[in-house]
Image (cartoon, rainbow, N blue to C red):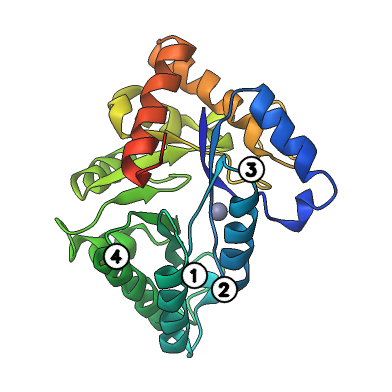
Amino acid sequence: MIDTHSHLFDDAFKEDLEACITRCINENVNKIVLVGFSHETNQKAFEIATKYNLFYPTAGLHPSEATKDYQKDLEDLEVFVQSHKVYAIGECGLDYHYGKENIVEQQLLFEGQINLAIKYNLPLIIHMRDATLDTFKILKKYQGKIRGVMHCYSGSYEMAKEFIKLGFMLSFGGPITFKNAKENKYIVENIDLKYILTETDCPYLAPMPYRGKRNESSYVKNVLIEIARLKQMSFEEVEKITEANAIKLFNLEV
Ligand SMILES: [Zn+2]
């Protein structure tokens, strides 16, 4: 199993990271993409990844990091990407959930990272919240030059098909296991498994039966169980295909 979106470097794991990693290994979660979202967490993800070989770090600047200094932040991110082996740019994207005051900076920070992904031939990890249309419009400008994943996808089925046309996969985490996640479940049932990835987004969004508690990468198993149920396929088959998808997208060493 692969958790393609983990923040195991978070302070929530300060006390028991070793135990979390052991649980991953015991559950056969053998690859974890450690997703940075700020200068500080990019560094943390990279440092932890050098200690354990199941981790694959990424580097990005989350839309909540967008300020008037976006240009300098992009320069610093590029320096980091040049000097550290990372497997993706992101998470990056647009988030209008907490208001639109910094919408211009968010978009410029996002486009700057798309250009970095193109320049360094890396996939993008996209965070999109309450900003589907703008995210789509921006990505569309780069169609044919980009690839990546819509992380913790929560948009519509129609838009899901559009993002796939742009070269993106859809990643599902804990929310797919929630009873009320009707659109998400419909998407998984109706989209070819070759476009689907599995993730946790830990420490957030724990799947059932851990909903509301701290999430961790080993719980990606519960996500896979639900996808297998929706697809009416065996767990092993879903595991095999989603693993292959992630290895291919992020170019992970096997
Ligand atoms: Zn995340």
Question: Nearer the N terminus, badge 1 or badge 3?
Answer: 1
Q: Residue 39 has which mark?
A: 2
Could you tell me the amino acid type at mark 4? Answer: Tyr
Q: Secondary structure at mark 3?
A: loop
CA distance for labels 4 and 2: 18 Å
The residue under the point 45% across, 71% down is 83
Note whether 181 is above or below 41 in the view shown: above
- Distance from disc 1 to disc 3, alpha carbons, whole Å, reads 20 Å
Question: Which residue has dot 3 on it?
Answer: 205
Q: Residue at x 71, y 26 (%)?
A: 209
- Residue 205 versus residue 92: which sits nearer the camera? 92
Which residue position is annotated with label 4? 120
User: What's the amino acid at mark 2?
Assistant: His
Q: Quadrant of residue 196?
A: top left
Label 4: how many residues lie within 10 Å, few (<14), some (14-19) or many (20+)? few
The total of numbered circles placed on residues is: 4
Image side of residue 162 versus residue 251, left or right: left
> Where is residue 143 shown, x and y percent of the image?
16, 58
Q: Amino acid at mark 1?
A: Leu
Give the structural element (helix, strand or loop) at label 2.
helix
The mark closer to the camera, 2 or 3, is 2
